[in-house]
């Protein structure tokens, strides 16, 4: 069940949240909220794939 929740959350994130890789954001110059959002998306993706 946990995996299904994270897969659904990943789909919602992909539709709603901005993609930093498409914008070619340099992570060394990213603001704190951008880094937090990047970390959140990474965490959701990792849990959706496990």
Image (spheres, rainbow, N blue to C red):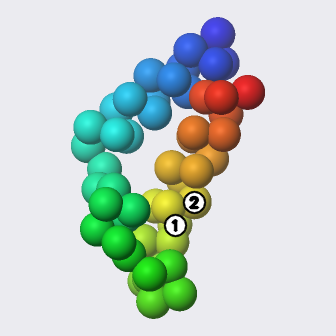
List x then y, in percent, for residue 4: 56, 14
2 on left or right of 36? right
Position of residue 22 in the picture relative to residue 5 (left or right): left
At horizontal 27% and vertical 37% (from top left) the residue drawn is 15
Say which quarter of the image contains residue 3: top right
* Relative horizontal placement of residue 50, taking residue 36 as reference (left or right): right
Mark 1 lies on a secondary structure that is helix
Q: Which residue is painted at 29% across and 68% down in the image? A: 23
Mark 2 Cα shell of 10 Å, populated few (<14), some (14-19), many (≥20): few
- What residue is drawn where x is 57% and y is 60%? 39
Badge 2 vs badge 1, beta-carbon distance below 8 Å? yes
**Left or right placement of residue 33 versus residue 14 in this view:** right
Whether 20 is drawn above or below 10: the answer is below
The residue tagged with tag 2: helix, strand or loop? helix
Q: Name the residue under label 1.
A: 36
Mark 2 and mark 1: Cα distance apart in space: 5 Å
- Please, which residue is most extreme toward the right here? 50
**What is the total number of numbered labels drawn onto the structure image?**
2
Q: What is the x, y in percent for residue 18?
A: 29, 56
Q: Check the image and name the residue furthest to the bottom.
A: 29
Spot the residue most to the top: 1
Quadrant of the snapshot with the C terminus: top right
Say which mark, if any, is on residue 39.
2
Please rate how many residues cluster around mark 1, counting C-alpha atoms within 10 Å: few if below 14, some from 14 to 19, many from 20.
few
At which x and y percent is residue 5?
54, 20
Task: Relative to 47, say whether 21 is above or below.
Answer: below
Q: Nearer the viewer, residue 24 or 50?
A: 24
The N terminus is located in which quarter?
A: top right
**Mark number displayed over residue 47:** none
């Amino acid at each position: 069940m946990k995996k299904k929740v994270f897969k659904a959350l990943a789909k919602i994130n992909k539709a709603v949240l901005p993609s930093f890789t498409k914008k070619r954001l340099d992570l060394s110059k990213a603001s704190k909220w951008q880094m937090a959002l990047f970390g959140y998306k990474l965490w959701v993706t990792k849990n959706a794939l496990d």
